[in-house]
Amino acid sequence: MQNKGEVLFSNCSKAFKSLVRRKQVDSVHVRREGHQLARKLTALDLTAIGVGTTIGAGVYVLVGTVAREHTGPALTVSFLIAGLAAALSAFCYAELASRCPSAGSAYHYAYICIGESVAWLIGWSLILEYTIGGSAIARGISPNLALFFGGEDKLPAFLVRHAIPQLGVVVDPCAAVLVLMVTALLCAGIKESSLVQTIVTTLNVCAMLFIIIAGGYLACKTGWAGYELRDGFFPFSVNGMLAGSAIVFFSYIGFDAVTGAAEEAKRPLRDLPVGIGMTLTLCCILYMLVSVVIVGLVPYFSLNPDTPISSAFSANGMQWAAYIVTAGAVTALCASLMGSLLPQPRLLMAMARDGLVPSFFSDINTSTQVPVKSTVTAGMLAAVLALFMDVSELSGMVSVGTLLAFTVVAISILILRYAPPDEVPLPSSLQQFIDSVRKQLDDDSKAIERKEYNDDDIVEQSPHLSEPGEASIQFPLIEKQFTADKKCQRKRRKIAVWNIALFCIGVLILTSAASADYLPSLVRFSVGAVGAAILLCSLIVLACLKQDEARHSFGHTGGFLCPFVPFLPAACILINVYLLISLGVGTWIRVSVWLIIGISVYVFYGWRHSSLRTAVYVPMEYLDHIYCASSSHHVQTLNLGSH
């Protein structure tokens, strides 16, 4: 029985370790023949991708609803607060993107810093986000196109929506055609698709600039009537303004598309942080200026919730401006569609490289240097959904994927700073070199210790020791001190890991209590106080704890560094978890079904085919020596073969 218990414990331990196994940062040592993307994107291209993905049609509709129901004239402040909250995640993304510039975005970072199981769940959630997001955007284009051309009857017959009564389905051929066109463009090459994205995004920005300039001119003529109200600047109080911030926060969640193209950036250490920063800055400025103008043109309660911008211009005698606003909405949707379909093939490619999905998705076309197979697969799936399904009810699931990714990226920053991976996985084929280097380095370290801690050094450190014999007797104490330092370092890492975990638990308890309106106030307050206490205590410990020196050599060094650690990532985790819990039970039930399917796929395929299944983990300091040993052995083999 005891042996069976030990075997069971050993198997459980191995299974748990396989769930948290972490991969190596892609570097010069990890070159995949035929699996490299073309590095052609500049900071301007990345900014165009980010701005195009972020500024969707939401801003053309959202400003009316939020201003009428939550903020009133304070809509601009809501956009500013939401932009600052999004900036917390942007700082975290910028550091990880510059340190680990590879395809996969949050999935890739989670795999490196947290573990395989969490990375799989993030990747699986992002697949859902990109697919549903792209389909929802595509189905929103056809009504705007119809409005632009003067009505749905003006569109060609094969693009008009029509219902199938027997199935209760509204078919949207225009949406499916647009998805297929964007898919074909993405297959042509990253430079070509980014050029089109830049053009479309420029048109969208020009439309928004027209709204700002023309609307500002009209508002100056009318005396900014929307601000001269008896209700004041905060008609729904500060709480209403904060509630509006939580809603408009989702207008910023497209900037992570920049990191999806990280492997195609020319100079990732510089271009990725610049692209992320420029995207968020431009979007925040445009959002705020548009909101200033629209709520200033007409009183907030007079805004049309469906077409707030065009109705505001019409109320001031500029009906023709509706065409420009509609054109802006169409270009915004097209740019957002391209941005939604761009990262998914690269995510599938990254997961296929790691063995978690079939290798079919990792193939890269030799002429275009684009993952054509995964692009076509993702595009076909999105086209089918856009053709047959009204995915507007599923749009909340898009937010779950993004907020989960934001949260995991912030946790990854804490792990990177306080407990970065100190072991790296190597293929089992290098086992002989690993054993050889391990033995050689162990012998060398012992020799170096004896040389460094010779009698003279010991006498210098301990002046009361004058005889060489006495000094040699003290050598075990120095070795003991060396061992004690290592134990102290391991203890610090363990304290850091436990406090990061406790902080996350405290956040979960606090936000759950804050969102549980159905509980009595006393219970909510008590539970929230417990969560806040755990959160604050763990955060204080992290703030007082020294960050790990190994963080300086993690990944590609010299790029952007996230400031104010641990406070900035902690605030990011708190905000994103609160928004996640606030999404509603219905959304979480639908997401849970998708996650259960994902867990099944991982258990029956991903876990068994993972590239780390047979990997051997070695200390980070052994890595270069092992690669040198294997390279020299390879050269010797080639020389012998030539002779």
Image: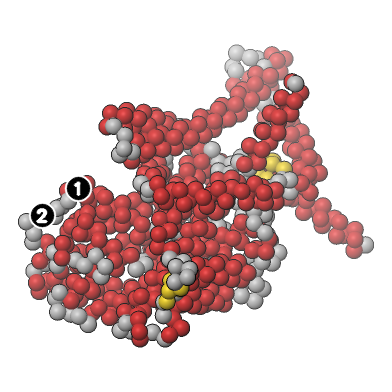
Residue 247 location (% of width, % of height): 31, 54
Residue 402 vertical placement versus 325 (above, below): above
Instruction: Work out whether mark 2 precedes mark 1 in sequence or the reverse, and give the earlier one.
Output: 2
Q: In the image shown, does 455 or 34 lie closer to the viewer?
A: 34
Q: Which residue corresponds to mark 1?
A: 238
Where residue 232 is drawn, which disc sits there? Answer: 2
Q: In the image shown, does 611 or 146 lie closer to the viewer?
A: 146
Q: Residue reaching furthest left?
A: 230
Residue drawn 63% across and 14% down?
A: 465
Q: Residue reaching furthest front?
A: 166
Q: In the image shown, does 394 or 190 lie closer to the viewer?
A: 394
Q: Is residue 198 visible?
A: no
Q: Quadrant of residue 29?
A: bottom right
Does the CB distance between marks 2 and 1 fall below 8 Å? no
Q: In the image shown, does 271 or 632 lie closer to the viewer?
A: 271
Residue 497 vertical placement versus 236 (above, below): above
Residue drawn 70% across and 51% down?
A: 609
Q: CA distance from mark 2 to mark 1?
A: 12 Å
Residue 527 vertical placement versus 249 (above, below): above
- Apparent side of residue 470 relative to residue 538 in the rendered image (left or right): right
Where residue 204 is drawn, which disc sits there? Answer: none
The quarter of the picture where the C terminus appears is bottom right
Q: Is residue 487 visible?
A: yes
Looking at the picture, which amino acid does disc 1 mark?
Val
Residue 545 location (% of width, % of height): 45, 32
Looking at the picture, which amino acid does disc 2 mark?
Gly
Residue 258 location (% of width, % of height): 47, 62
- Apparent side of residue 517 relative to residue 9 in the rendered image (left or right): left
The quarter of the picture where the N terminus appears is top right
Q: Quadrant of residue 30?
A: bottom right
Residue drawn 40% across and 62% down?
A: 392
